[in-house]
Amino acid sequence: MPDAELMPGEVARPAARNHPGLLALTAVVLLLSVFFGIAFSRSNYTQPEAGAAPGFEVTTFAGESLRLADLRGQVVVLNFWASWCGPCRVEAPVLQAVHERWRERGVTVLGLTYTDVDRHSLAFIEEFGLTYPNAPDRGNRVSGRYNIQGVPETFVIDQQGDIAHFFYAAVNQTALENVLSRLLPGAA
């Protein structure tokens, strides 16, 4: 009632309006609450950075069955990657170089694809000339055990099967070889 008479003691109040800015602010606050809620709940699920490496068995793209337990006594560089991952393209030549330099010294590089399409993974392997074993992680079984948050992520597993080092992003050759030198003194 725009021209309604006020009773004694009443104060005129503006009519309520829809404020698009208020709606947008509410939506942003709601989205941030959901985002931080998920992040908080996942904070209890971090990648293993020490202790026994979770065991697994995979079949490589070449058809070879491979079990982590069978690699005991070697240092394993376990790399989770995907063909659609930009940083994975940067680190692929690094991992190949490490494989070539360290395989005779007791190091196995093993790549596992994360939420990738086989034909894209195979094209990536061919593009970068990767000769170390690579396998699809069917159903994300292995990445789930390692609680992968994204790619690339790399775990260095020592000769006893324990996680010796964790790289959360693309590895560089110097940092990775420093870890390997520490685990294999005299092999550098």
Image (cartoon, rainbow, N blue to C red):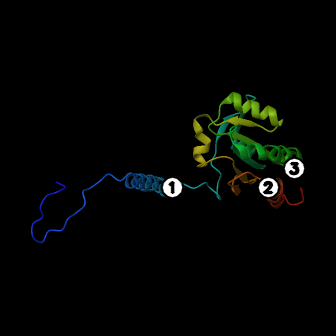
Which residue is disc 2 drawn over? 176
Residue at screen point 26% across, 56% down: 16
Mark closest to the chain's N terminus, 1 or 2: 1
Crowd tier of the residue under label 1, counting other residues whose Cα lies within 10 Å: few below 14, some 14–19, many 20 or above: few
Q: Amino acid at mark 3?
A: Arg
- Contact (CB < 8 A) between labels 1 and 2? no
Q: How many marks?
A: 3
Residue 40 on image: x %, y %: 48, 58
Q: Secondary structure at mark 3?
A: helix
Which residue is depicted at the point 73% across and 47% down?
87
Outermost residue toward the left in this view: 8
The percent position of residue 120, horizontal first and vertical second, equals: 70, 31
Query: Given the current orientation, which residue lies at the most extreme bottom position?
Result: 9
Q: How far from the left and from the top, in percent, is residue 145?
A: 58, 46
Is residue 186 at least partly visible in the picture? Answer: yes
Task: Please tell me whether residue 53 is drawn above or below residue 13 in the rendered image.
Answer: above
- Nearer-the-camera pick, 128 or 134: 128
Q: Secondary structure at mark 2?
A: helix
Q: Would you name the residue on which mark 1 appears?
A: 39
Estimate the spatial distance between the alpha carbons at disc 1 and disc 2, rounded to whole Å. Answer: 29 Å
Could you tell me which residue is drawn at 74 percent across and 30 percent down? Answer: 122
Q: Amino acid at mark 2?
A: Leu
Q: CA distance from mark 1 to mark 3?
A: 40 Å
**Disc 3 versus disc 2: distance between alpha carbons?**
14 Å
On the rendered image, what quadrant is the C terminus found in? bottom right
Horizontal arrangement in the rendering, residue 48 relative to residue 70 (left or right):
left
Task: Name the front one of labels 1 and 3.
Answer: 1
In the picture of the structure, the residue carrying the numbered disc 3 is: 105
Identify which amino acid the numbered label 1 is placed on.
Answer: Ala
CB under 8 Å between discs 3 and 2: no
Q: Residue at x 62, y 55 (%)?
A: 48
